[in-house]
Amino acid sequence: MTDKIDLAPMSVRQLRSRRRRLVKSLPDIEGLITGSVVDQGRRCGKEGCRCTQGELHGPYTYVVLPRIQGRTRTVYVPKSAAAAVRQGAALSIEVQETLQEISAINIELLTRRKLP
Ligand SMILES: [Zn+2]
């Protein structure tokens, strides 16, 4: 996680070099997943099952995808894929932060009439 840094006191040269460093720091995003990983217990729906008394099955792992047109999609994650999915989701957060910072630098350069 990167702390928000104040770009205003930085020189144009510093901004550009920071931007270059950020671009170079972007990781391989092949495994990227934009979603959050959750562990949840489930009810099976069978009458008289212990889960109806609140003793849920699981927990199982799911990835909750961002809302599209108000609908949330939840995808079951098998144990064999859990580590990869967690890494992919963490990667997404890391990359978003870097993208936001690159954008902030570009906006700062724009306001100084130094873009491109
Ligand atoms: Zn049950």
Image: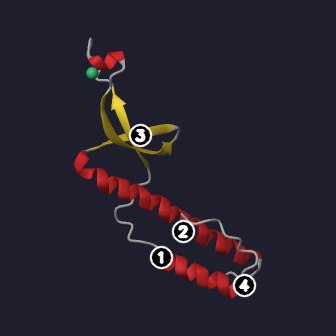
Residue 25 or residue 3, whichever sits in front: 3
Label 1 secondary element: helix
Marks 4 and 1, how far apart at CA: 21 Å
In the rendering, at what x and y percent does residue 80 appear?
A: 22, 50
Q: Which mark is residue 11?
A: 4
In the rendering, at what x and y percent does residue 23 appear?
A: 51, 77
Viewer-nearest of labels 3 and 1? Answer: 1
Disc 3 under 8 Å from ligand 1? The reply is no
Marks 1 and 2, how far apart at CA: 8 Å
Q: Residues within 10 Å of mark 3 (few under 14, many from 20)?
A: few
Name the residue carrying label 2.
Answer: 98
Label 2 secondary element: helix
Q: Amino acid at mark 3?
A: Arg
Marks 4 and 2, how far apart at CA: 20 Å
Position of 112 compared to 85: left or right?
right
Residue furthest top in the image: 48
Viewer-nearest of labels 4 and 3? Answer: 4
Residue 116 shows in this picture:
no
Residue 72 or residue 12, whichever sits in front: 12
Q: How is the image coloured?
A: secondary structure
Q: Which mark is residue 73?
A: 3
Q: Amino acid at mark 1?
A: Ser
Q: Are marks 1 and 2 in contact (CB under 8 Å)?
A: yes
User: Within the image, what quadrant is residue 78 found in?
Assistant: top left
Name the residue carrying label 1.
Answer: 25
